[in-house]
């Protein structure tokens, strides 16, 4: 690929001429051959190697391997064939990690996290060269994936339910690829994908001279790995130049105020801000500065990452003896050079922070610091509490602080749950005691009523029910002497009370 390429998808990959990948295409096979064509996705298929250029045109296809074959084995066969895949030294194709990273075939880094879109709102900005490289590699390699999608659609249309020999089916697959190239070259609009690359030219030529130096193996090499690392570092350096932007003091003031507002309006939880907070910060920045070019990613995201790192460093060194914070001058204060050297040994990133001005540290404590509402009022104020000036915190281990910040909320939750449980159990016991006491009183009332011989059973039950239903009558009944209780029962049975 030309070094002066301006295509946003491909300009980061010098010498890259396209992408390749294998895919499974379902076929019909005789019963005895099915085990060989059984792929890892539980289908019966052939494993097709497809190679496309940057304009999504097929330049090579190998369509004879069984579905059980590995992608690397199919590529090795393509390289070793007399009329196989030809890759000039100095050129390469993008491919996934199913293949080996070796001269002519550029794979992404393994086990590296990244977001597919480096500019989308809410996505995390690349933190290093490998993340950015994988991100752009995946976007560029998407040409082979989209091409395979179109290809499979055409195969599904052309494929007949009539059984053909495998040789014929493989030729039909190749015919679909040729048909796709023809459509993209001859028609203004692709019926399947209504997009034709601008200034498309067919550059693939089978009549290469015999003395041209081709890639003849797919073995890994340290030189190729170093070349990939250099390419990734160059891309990351260029990206950082484009993304790096100097913030003005008013812009930082607005960002700090916006973070405080988010904290007070419920956007922050115990483990940080909720998803989408960067978009809210972007809206607030655009409201304050209508023509600003600051965006949630990478600008605000990078600023937040930088501030958190600086806050953590300052918070850590203030945990040592002899190093304090002056809230008036907004600077680190220490008269003990040995204490500062010790702090720098424990936190190397603090070495350049001693004589700098930190106007937002108090705000960072409020935004990034842990909740200190449960701190003892009699305890001495820390550098993250209002009213502190040149106080020096007592020495504590960073690990212990982290454990306290985790265990504290957990213990508070357990204590609250225990208090609530005790209260509810007390209410239940009280209700049970009241119900038990009422049962005993009912038994005592009916025992007295049952001693009156001239009352019928119905009259006894009516009198007992009237006494139990009225708490005042019940209280008065048990306060009367025995002869008065009998008189009250007679009056109630007669309906006079």
Image (cartoon, rainbow, N blue to C red):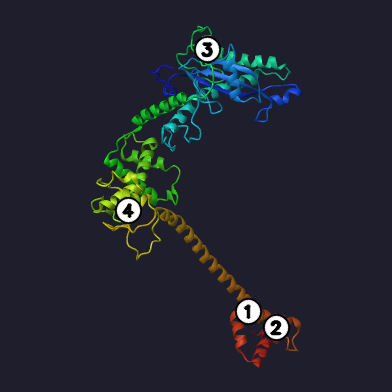
Marks 1 and 3, the one that precedes in the sequence: 3
Marks 4 and 1, the one that precedes in the sequence: 4
Instruction: Classify 10 Å Cα crowding around label 1: few (below 14), some (14-19), many (20 and above).
Output: few
Marks 2 and 4, the one that precedes in the sequence: 4
- What is the distance, in whole Å, between disc 2 and disc 4 at their CAs? 77 Å
Residue 437, labelled with which disc?
Answer: 1
Marks 2 and 1, the one that precedes in the sequence: 1
Residue closest to the eye, 5 or 448: 5
- Say which element carries label 3: helix
Q: Can the viewer see residue 134?
A: yes
Query: Position of 232 compared to 182: left or right?
Result: left
Query: Position of 156 compared to 418: left or right?
Result: right
- What is the distance, in whole Å, between disc 3 and disc 2 at their CAs? 104 Å
Q: Which residue is mark 3?
A: 185
Q: Which residue is mark 2?
A: 446
Q: Residue at x 73, y 86 (%)?
A: 450
Residue 417, labelled with which disc?
Answer: none
- Tags 2 and 1 in contact by the CB under 8 Å rule? no
Residue 180 in which image quadrant: top right
Does residue 412 sit above or below 309 in this rendering?
Answer: below
Between circles 1 and 3, the one closer to the viewer is: 3
Residue closest to the eye, 178 or 24: 24
Q: Which residue is mark 4?
A: 318
């Amino acid at each position: 690929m030309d070094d002066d390429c301006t295509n946003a998808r491909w300009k980061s990959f010098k010498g890259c001429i396209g992408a390749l990948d294998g895919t499974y295409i379902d076929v019909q096979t005789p019963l005895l051959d099915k085990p060989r064509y059984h792929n890892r996705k539980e289908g019966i298929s052939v494993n097709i190697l497809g190679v496309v250029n940057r304009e999504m045109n097929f330049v090579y296809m190998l369509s004879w391997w069984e579905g059980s074959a590995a992608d690397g084995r199919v590529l090795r066969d393509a390289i070793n064939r007399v009329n196989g895949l030809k890759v000039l030294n100095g050129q390469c194709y993008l491919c996934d990690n199913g293949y080996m990273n070796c001269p002519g075939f550029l794979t992404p880094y393994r086990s590296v996290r990244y977001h597919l879109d480096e500019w989308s709102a809410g996505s995390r900005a690349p933190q290093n060269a490998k993340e950015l490289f994988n991100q752009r590699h995946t976007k560029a390699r998407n040409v082979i994936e989209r091409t395979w999608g179109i290809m499979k659609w055409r195969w599904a249309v052309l494929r007949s339910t009539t059984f053909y020999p495998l040789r014929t089916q493989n030729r039909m697959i190749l015919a679909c690829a040729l048909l796709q190239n023809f459509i993209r070259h001859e028609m203004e609009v692709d019926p399947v994908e209504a997009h034709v690359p601008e200034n498309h030219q067919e550059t693939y030529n089978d009549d290469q001279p015999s003395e041209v130096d081709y890639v003849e193996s797919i073995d890994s090499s340290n030189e190729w790995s170093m070349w990939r690392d250099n390419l990734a570092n160059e891309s990351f350096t260029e990206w950082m130049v484009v993304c790096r932007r100097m913030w003005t003091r008013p812009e930082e003031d607005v960002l700090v105020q916006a973070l405080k507002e988010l904290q007070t309006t419920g956007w922050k939880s115990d483990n940080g801000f909720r998803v989408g907070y960067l978009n809210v910060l972007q809206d607030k920045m655009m409201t304050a500065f209508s023509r600003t070019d600051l965006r949630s990613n990478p600008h605000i995201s990078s600023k937040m990452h930088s501030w958190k790192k600086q806050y953590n460093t300052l918070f850590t060194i203030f945990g040592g003896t002899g190093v304090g914070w002056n809230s008036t001058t907004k600077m680190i204060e220490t008269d003990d050079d040995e204490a500062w050297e010790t702090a720098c040994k424990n936190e190397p990133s603090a070495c350049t922070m001693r004589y700098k001005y930190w106007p937002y540290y108090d705000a960072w404590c409020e935004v990034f610091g842990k909740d200190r509402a449960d701190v003892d009022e009699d305890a001495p104020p820390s550098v993250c509490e209002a009213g502190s000036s040149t106080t020096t915190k007592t020495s504590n281990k960073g690990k212990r602080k982290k454990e306290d910040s985790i265990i504290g909320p957990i213990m508070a939750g357990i204590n609250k749950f225990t208090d609530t449980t005790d209260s509810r159990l007390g209410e239940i016991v009280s209700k049970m005691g009241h119900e038990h006491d009422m049962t005993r009183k009912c038994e005592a009332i009916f025992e007295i009523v049952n001693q009156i011989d001239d009352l019928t059973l119905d009259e006894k039950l009516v009198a007992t029910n009237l006494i139990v239903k009225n708490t005042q009558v019940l209280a008065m009944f048990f306060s009367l002497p025995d002869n008065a209780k009998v008189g009250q029962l007679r009056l109630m049975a007669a309906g006079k009370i």
